[in-house]
Amino acid sequence: MKKIIIIDGGPRRNMNTAQMLQKFAEGAKSAGEHIEVKTIRLYDMDYKGCMSCMACKLKDRASNVCRFKDRLSPVLEEISMADGLVLGSPIYFGEVTGQMRAFLERLSFPWLSYNDYSMTAPKQMPVVLIETLNGTPERNNSNGFGSMEYCITRALGQPQKIVAYNTYQVNDYSRYELAGFSEEAKRQWRDAHWEEDLQKAFDAGRKMAEM
C-alpha cells in the first residue's frame, strides 16, 4: 500500500484550492486500490509555527522530524513515512496562507543541519505544489511557496507546480465590494481555463500514484 498525504492550506472547504486538491485525490485513487490518499486541512487544526525549541538539533538526539508536541506532531510523523506529498494553498498577499507557512516551518526546519547546511528529509518522495490565485499569468504578485519551495527542492528534489490563475474569490460578486474585478471577465476566464486546471490536478495525482 502506497500512501499520499495532501495538505490543504486553504480556509474554505469548497472553493478553488479544495477543489483542485480533491481532483488530485481522485486522480491518485484512479491508479488503483493500492493507493491510500489522506487529506489534512490545516485550518481544522490548532498549532503554531516553529517554536525555536531546538529539540531537533540536540547532540546525539538530532531529528529530521519536529519534536515539539501539539496537534501537528502526528501529521509530521505521518508525512515522514509517506510515499508522496501534495501541498495546496491559495495565495494571499503574494504568498501562501499563514497556516501553510507555519506548517512548512515545522516540516522543513528539522531537515536543516547547522553543521554543514545540508537539507535531509526522513524519506525521499515526489512533491506537488498547487497554488490558486486571483491574478492572471501576466498580472500577479505571487511569490507562491517562496523560500519554502527552495527548502523542499533541496531536501526532496524539484517539485511539480500547478497554478490556477484568475480564480473566483466569491460565487456572487454583486454582494461584495469587489469593483476592481470584472465578474464577466472572471467568468470568461473560468469557462476557458478552470476545467483544464482541474484536469492538470487529476493528471498529477494519477502520475504520482503510478510512480
Image: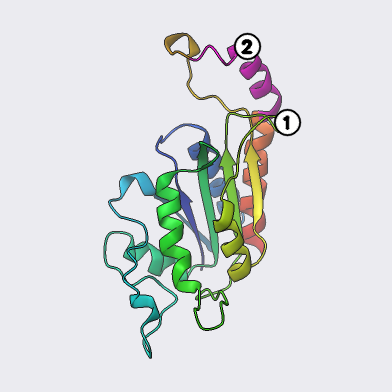
Binning the other alpha carbons within 10 Å of mark 1 as few (below 14), some (14 to 19) or many (20 upward) gives: few
Can you name the residue that lies furthest to the bottom here?
Answer: 60
Q: CA distance from mark 1 to mark 2?
A: 18 Å
Binning the other alpha carbons within 10 Å of mark 2 as few (below 14), some (14 to 19) or many (20 upward) gives: few
At 64% from the left and 23% from the top, the residue drawn is: 190
Q: Amino acid at mark 1?
A: Glu
Give the side of residue 184 with respect to residue 55, left or right.
right
| Residue 32 visible somewhere in the drawing | no
The relative height of residue 174 versus residue 204 in the rendered view (above or below) is above
To which quarter of the image does residue 62 belong? bottom left
Give the residue pinned by disc 2: 184
Question: Residue 39 at x, y = what percent?
Answer: 44, 51
Q: Is residue 188 magenta?
A: yes
At 52% from the left and 73% from the top, the residue drawn is: 121
At 51% from the left and 36% from the top, the residue drawn is: 93
> Which stretch appears magenta?
178-193
The relative height of residue 78 versus residue 57 in the rendered view (above or below) is above
Give the side of residue 26 with respect to residue 138, left or right.
left
Q: Main secondary structure of the magenta part?
A: helix
Tell me the SS state at disc 1.
loop
- Viewer-proximal residue among 28 and 88: 88
To which quarter of the image does residue 137 belong? top right
| Residue 123 visible somewhere in the drawing | yes
Question: Residue 162 at x, y = what percent?
Answer: 65, 45
Tell me the SS state at disc 2.
helix
Earlier residue among tags 1 and 2: 1
Instruction: Determine which of the numbered discs, if any, sits on residue 138 in the image.
Output: 1
Give the side of residue 82 with respect to residue 138, left or right.
left
Q: Amino acid at mark 2?
A: Glu
Quadrant that contains the C terminus? bottom right
At 33% from the left and 60% from the top, the residue drawn is: 72
- Viewer-proximal residue among 183 and 203: 183
